[in-house]
Image (spheres, helix red, strand yellow):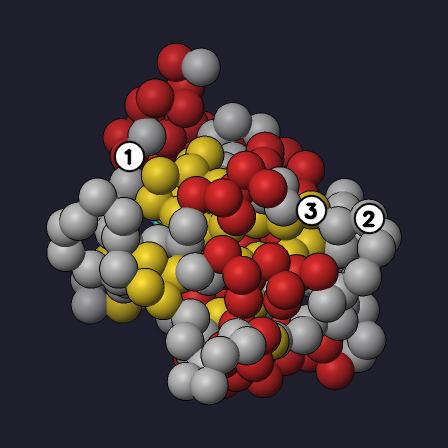
Amino acid sequence: MFTIFPTIVEGPLRESLLGKAIEAGIIDVRVHDIRDFATDRHRQVDDEPYGGGPGMVLKPEPVFAAVESLGEGTKRVIVLSPAGRRLDQALVRDLAKEPRLVLISGRYEGVDERVVEGLPAEEVSIGDYVLSGGEIPALVVLEAVTRLIPGVVGKEESLERESFEDGHLDHPHYTRPSEFRGMAVPDVLLSGNHAEVERWRREAAEEKTRRNRPDLLER
Ligand code: SAM
């Protein structure tokens, strides 16, 4: 991961699923400060946009130097950008096959376009909205991909059933108590009849998908 704000990603990399996967050596995540690759006296990483206008642009030289410091070898380079291809579970599955991913976080108006052209790199967006930096989007990509690495998520089954895996959203989940503030857990889930539970889950997933994401059913 390359960023000019490494501390933003440090906390999430220590916690929960990502933290455990790193600690267990299942994935190896390295965070580099792009500023360490600036060569001028002021360690400048941004400059004004050609053509004028507001904001600053991340300069190409430190970003190229940063990625080239990784040396030769197979790697897929991604620049996080709202103007990129939108991330979905299909892209996550594809990225999970890569031995090495390089995630470049932009700031300000983004990175100089020659980073995309010249490295080369692909642009990936986490959704149709604009954040202030690529660090959280980079963590989103990393966490989604990490879930698919064998050994990271406890029971493989819980992955198969997740939203988007079969073109549906996940079914609703319930835990104890069986009644809470007048709301009861559907009887079938307490019945112990596995076939009925399975049928209820399929139908409930279908219903939820129709309600929240009808576009998934149309595809
Ligand atoms: N000028 C850019 C545009 O309108 O497309 C917005 C730049 S944004 C303020 C700064 C940085 O945040 C981007 O370079 C990118 O790395 C990151 N970013 C913001 N929204 C994002 C999104 N939806 N997906 C991925 N990265 C995003």
Q: Amino acid at mark 2?
A: Thr
**x then y, percent, for residue 72:** 84, 55
Residue at image location 14% in from the left, 56% down from the top: 54
Q: Residue at x 27, y 48 (%)?
A: 50
* Marks 2 & 3, CB-CB < 8 Å contact: yes
**Mark-to-mark CA distance, 2 and 1:** 39 Å
Q: What residue did someone put label 1 on?
A: 212
Q: CA distance from mark 1 to mark 3?
A: 33 Å
Q: Which residue in the rendered view is the most extreme toward the front?
A: 41
Q: Nearer the viewer, mark 2 or mark 1?
A: 2
Asked if disc 2 is less than 8 Å from ligand 1, the answer is: no
Q: Where, quadrant-wise, is the C terminus in this rendering?
A: top left
Residue located beneath label 2 in the image: 74
Q: Residue at x 34, y 21 (%)?
A: 215
Q: In the figure, is residue 49 to the left or right of 52?
A: right
Using the image, determine if residue 21 lies above or below residue 92: below
Q: Label 3 is placed on what type of residue? A: Arg
Q: Position of residue 129 (x, y in %)?
A: 25, 47
Residue, far right:
73
In which quarter of the view is residue 59 placed?
bottom left
Badge 2: few (under 14), some or many (20 or more) residues near its Cα, within 10 Å? few
Helix, strand or loop for disc 3: strand
- Numbered-mark total: 3
Q: Amino acid at mark 1?
A: Asn
Residue at numbered disc 3 = 76
Q: Looking at this rendering, what residue extends furthest in the left direction?
A: 53
Q: Is residue 6 above or below residue 210?
A: below
The disc label shown at residue 151, or none = none
